[in-house]
Image (tube, helix red, strand yellow):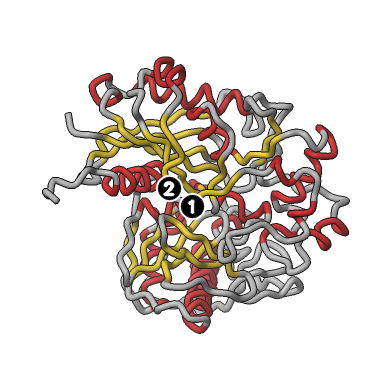
């Protein structure tokens, strides 16, 4: 069998894997929920072991490289052998009481400056376990588990810990901390970290020459899974609206994040609005039923700003921006249509903001996430955005596998004679 690659997606509730061949075709995919919560690293390894064991033996023996994505911001304290010192702090858990320290460590602000960032969790873990403990994000720790070496960290997973992608460095104030050497040595997304540890390969039934490739975050892996072209933008229709675009240079602005994935800049922003607002009023069954009653080629006449609560971060950075959810019509279907139109207007403004900051305007949008399955919402968005909208059902595991595949293709020996 031809050489294969493995992508492993560690999400909020479970793990999914995808096996790809050299033509980028999925040969096998499956998933399993965590048997314990996201904060239990033993559950991460059990899920990985279970899923790898399910891969047909012939395919498993042909895996030459693998890459992992994880929930951005989920941080773990471990010793030099990778043994966890306790539970991980999930990405959704803010750590209070470190505001002054954060201001000193990252005075210029950014993803690491918030109480909900990884740096705040690092301060909390260092306070509990002392400065001698290693600090590793979920994907980086799993990479260490495969390698038998917890030295490395992937750049995108460490932005919220303070890593600067453009300067390739930690903030100056952070470099003076006594626990600096407990942070990972950062490697670019898509780079080869090393070869799987022999004992781990034997345990999992993987080839002992399989390469471990630095992956990315789970949201970036979802974008990679869509295999976007140069004229494509990607919108994640989840609890929040996330708009991302590959660009030639990083983009800066309020609410903008810039990642480098496989050597390319992936920039975008996330609104506080999204499908989470819809669930404040309707359950999934009712959403489906009411959506069927909507004629997406007509306008509701309603003007809503469907924020879940006061405050917005993108496309405008305004912590006091108020939701507009009234007047509510008698018809629930009409009310839902107005909410969907309001979300489409926020999305359109988001793309306008990215374009104004220097991104090339997309000619087509690729939708991912739960909301992408709603055909009425898709048509409303097409009309309001003025461009075609398609839906991708590819899973993040296939996206991160693409990084392993690119690394494998780059390392293929040349057949030319020198």
Tell me the residue at 38%/64% (across/down): 378
- Return the mark for residue 188: 1
Percent of width and height locating residue 257:
57, 65
Give the number of marks: 2
Q: Residue furthest bottom?
A: 356
- Return the mark for residue 310: none
Which quadrant is home to the N terminus? top left
Q: Residue furthest left?
A: 417
Q: Give how far apart the Cα atoms at labels 1 and 2 are.
A: 6 Å
Compared to 217, does 58 lie above or below? above
Q: Tag 1's secondary structure? A: loop
Label 2: how many residues lie within 10 Å, few (<14), some (14-19) or many (20+)? some
Tell me if 288 is positioned left or right of 42 in this view: left
Compared to 200, does 127 lie above or below? below
Compared to 21, does 196 lie above or below? above
Label 1: how many residues lie within 10 Å, few (<14), some (14-19) or many (20+)? many
Percent of width and height locating residue 165:
56, 61
The picture quadrant where one finds residue 89 is top right
Q: Tag 2's secondary structure? A: loop
Tell me the residue at 34%/46% (across/down): 407
Percent of width and height locating residue 84:
68, 26
Percent of width and height locating residue 121:
75, 45
Tell me if 29 is positioned left or right of 312 in this view: left
Compared to 285, does 296 lie above or below? below
85, 341: nearer the viewer: 85
Q: Residue furthest front?
A: 418
Q: Read off the residue under disc 2.
A: 191
225, 112: nearer the viewer: 112
Tell me the residue at 66%/45% (across/down): 91
Q: Are marks 1 and 2 in contact (CB under 8 Å)?
A: yes
Tell me the residue at 62%/41% (across/down): 137
């Amino acid at each position: 069998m031809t050489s294969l690659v493995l992508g492993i997606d560690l999400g909020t509730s479970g793990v999914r894997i995808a096996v790809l061949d050299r033509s980028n075709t999925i040969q096998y995919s499956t998933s399993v929920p965590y048997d314990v919560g996201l904060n239990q690293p033993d559950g991460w390894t059990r899920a990985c072991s279970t899923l790898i064991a399910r891969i047909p033996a012939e395919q498993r023996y042909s895996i030459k490289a693998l890459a992992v994505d994880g929930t951005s911001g989920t941080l773990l304290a471990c010793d030099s052998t990778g043994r966890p010192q306790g539970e991980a702090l999930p990405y959704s858990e803010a750590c209070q009481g470190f505001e002054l320290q954060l201001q000193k460590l990252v005075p210029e602000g950014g993803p690491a400056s918030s109480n909900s960032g990884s740096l705040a969790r690092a301060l909390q873990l260092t306070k509990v376990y002392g400065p001698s403990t290693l600090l590793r994000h979920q994907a980086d720790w799993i990479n260490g588990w495969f390698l038998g070496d917890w030295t490395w960290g992937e750049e995108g997973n460490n932005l919220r810990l303070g890593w600067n992608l453009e300067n390739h460095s930690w903030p100056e104030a952070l470099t003076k901390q006594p626990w600096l050497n407990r942070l990972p040595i950062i490697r670019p997304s898509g780079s080869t970290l090393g070869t799987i540890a022999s004992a781990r390969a034997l345990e999992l039934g993987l080839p002992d020459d399989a390469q471990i490739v630095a992956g990315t975050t789970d949201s970036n892996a979802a974008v990679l899974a869509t295999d976007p072209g140069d004229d494509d933008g990607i919108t994640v229709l989840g609890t929040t609206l996330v708009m991302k675009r590959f660009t030639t240079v990083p983009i800066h602005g309020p609410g903008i994040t810039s990642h480098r994935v496989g050597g390319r800049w992936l920039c975008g922003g996330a609104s506080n609005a999204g499908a989470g607002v819809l669930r404040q009023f309707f359950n999934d069954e009712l959403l489906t039923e009411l959506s069927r009653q909507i004629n997406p080629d007509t306008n509701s006449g309603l003007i809503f700003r469907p924020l879940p609560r006061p405050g917005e971060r993108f496309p405008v950075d305004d912590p006091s921006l108020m939701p507009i959810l009234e007047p509510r019509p008698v018809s629930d279907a009409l009310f839902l249509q107005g909410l969907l139109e309001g979300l489409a207007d926020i999305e359109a403004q988001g793309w306008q903001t990215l374009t104004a900051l220097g991104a090339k305007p997309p000619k087509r949008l690729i939708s991912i996430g739960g909301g992408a399955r709603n055909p009425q919402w898709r048509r409303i968005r097409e009309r309001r955005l003025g461009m075609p909208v398609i839906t991708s059902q590819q899973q993040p595991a296939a996206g991160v596998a693409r990084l392993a595949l690119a690394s494998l293709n780059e390392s293929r020996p040349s057949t030319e004679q020198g």
